[in-house]
Amino acid sequence: MPTLHTYDYAVIRVVPRVDREEFINVGVIVSCPGAQHLEAAIEVDPARLRAFAPTLELQDLQPWLDAIVAICRGDAGAGPIAQLPARARFHFLTAKRSSVVQMSSTHVGRTADPQGVVEHLLKKMVRVPT
């Protein structure tokens, strides 16, 4: 029987007008300390974003989304936060903030395949159902 690991995840959201609290899901972050796994995946549908927030330019948003992925990977060029332990990076990224890029509340699950969880959550929470 495969080893099950507890993981936490949050959905990455774009909130064009914070005062309205409307959002579109654009990615996920999964932290699985038992498997030493921290990963963020972003999938922005430009047409959907444009329909949802016509005044928001994707090229203005992209550096913020790229930074989330880089911090999760621990990239040296992502600044001092990226050099923290993985669990601290997850908590930093999922902290409540009032900005255009926000995270959902964190949720918990168990899996034997943390990378598979990322794909599952993208399909379930981010991609438009086909």
Image (cartoon, rainbow, N blue to C red):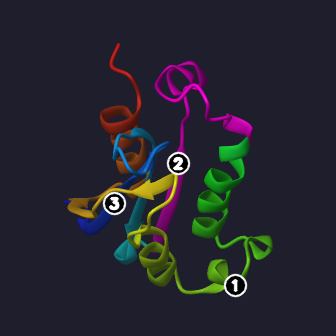
Q: Nearer the viewer, residue 2 or 110?
A: 110
Q: Relative to 77, is 84 above or below?
A: below
Tag 3 residue: 9
Helix, strand or loop status at disc 2: strand
Classify residue 29 as left or right of residue 130. Answer: right
> Which residue is tagged 2?
41
Quarter of the rendering containing residue 10 = bottom left
Q: Which of the two residues, 125 or 99, is positioned nearer the viewer here?
A: 99
- Tell which tag, 2 or 1, sits nearer the viewer: 1
Task: Please give the residue where the numbered disc 1 appears in the rendered image.
Answer: 80
Residue range (magenta) = 36-59
Q: Secondary structure at mark 3?
A: strand
- Callout 1: SS: helix
- Seen in the image, is 68 located left or right of residue 20? right
The answer for how far apart the CA atoms under marks 1 and 3 are is: 22 Å
Q: Residues within 10 Å of mark 1 (few under 14, many from 20)?
A: few
The mark nearer the N terminus, 2 or 1, is 2
Q: Residue at x 42, y 41 (%)?
A: 119
Q: Quadrant of residue 81?
A: bottom right
